[in-house]
Image (cartoon, grey):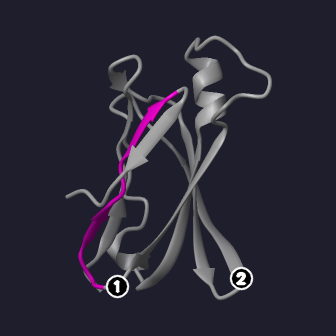
Amino acid sequence: MSGYLTTHVLDTARGCPAQGLKIELYRINGDTRSHLKTLVTNDDGRTDEQILPASEFELGEYELIFYAGAYLDASGTPPENPRFLDIIPIRFGMSEASHYHVPLLLSPFGYSTYRGS
């Protein structure tokens, strides 16, 4: 298939890319959740490689886990105990062989996502 998956994480509170944020990718198949890989965002808030390249792309349901709390701690955001946002799961489906881009706009007290291009 010719599809692939990417992301871009932006820290909207600081107005910059979210560098050093850990991301995990899982494939969901019914009640089974299989870990596929772990990546970390670079200086531009993107991963150095496609999260799911064309050679590994399959249609189906997936989940991206964004470790926002650890990123916020490392970026100097004032600590909370517990942190309002810690781990952000985004579950989504890929139903056609195309470019799926799942960005995350992040602040200490909120986030948003959408299907980007």
Where residue 95 appears, as percent x and y from the top left, is 34, 85
- Give the vertical position of 34 relative to 95 (above or below): above
- Give the vertical position of 88 relative to 111 (above or below): below
Where residue 92 appears, as percent x and y from the top left, is 46, 70
Residue at 58% x, 28% y is 71
Where residue 60 appears, as percent x and y from the top left, is 46, 84
**Could you say which quadrant of the image residue 17 lies in?**
top left
In the image, is residue 69 part of the stretch drawn in magenta?
A: no
One can see residue 98 in this view: yes
Residue at 35% x, 44% y is 8
Image marks 2 and 1: residues in contact by CB distance under 8 Å: no
In the image, is residue 102 part of the stretch drawn in magenta?
A: yes
The secondary structure type at the circle numbered 2 is strand
Residue that numbered label 1 is attached to: 95
Residue at 32% x, 70% y is 4
Residue 29 horizontal side relative to residue 59, left or right: right
What residue range appears in magenta? Answer: 96-107
User: Is the residue marked by circle 1 packed among few (<14), some (14-19), or many (20+) residues within 10 Å?
Assistant: few
Residue 73 got which mark? none
Query: Closer to the N terminus: mark 2 or mark 1?
Result: 2
- Give the vertical position of 2 relative to 105 (above or below): below
Judged from this view, the residue extending furthest toward the right is 81
Residue nearest the viewer, comparing 57 with 66: 66
Residue that numbered label 2 is attached to: 32
Where residue 5 appears, as percent x and y from the top left, is 36, 65
User: Is the residue marked by circle 2 packed among few (<14), some (14-19), or many (20+) residues within 10 Å?
Assistant: few
**Tag 2: amino acid:** Thr
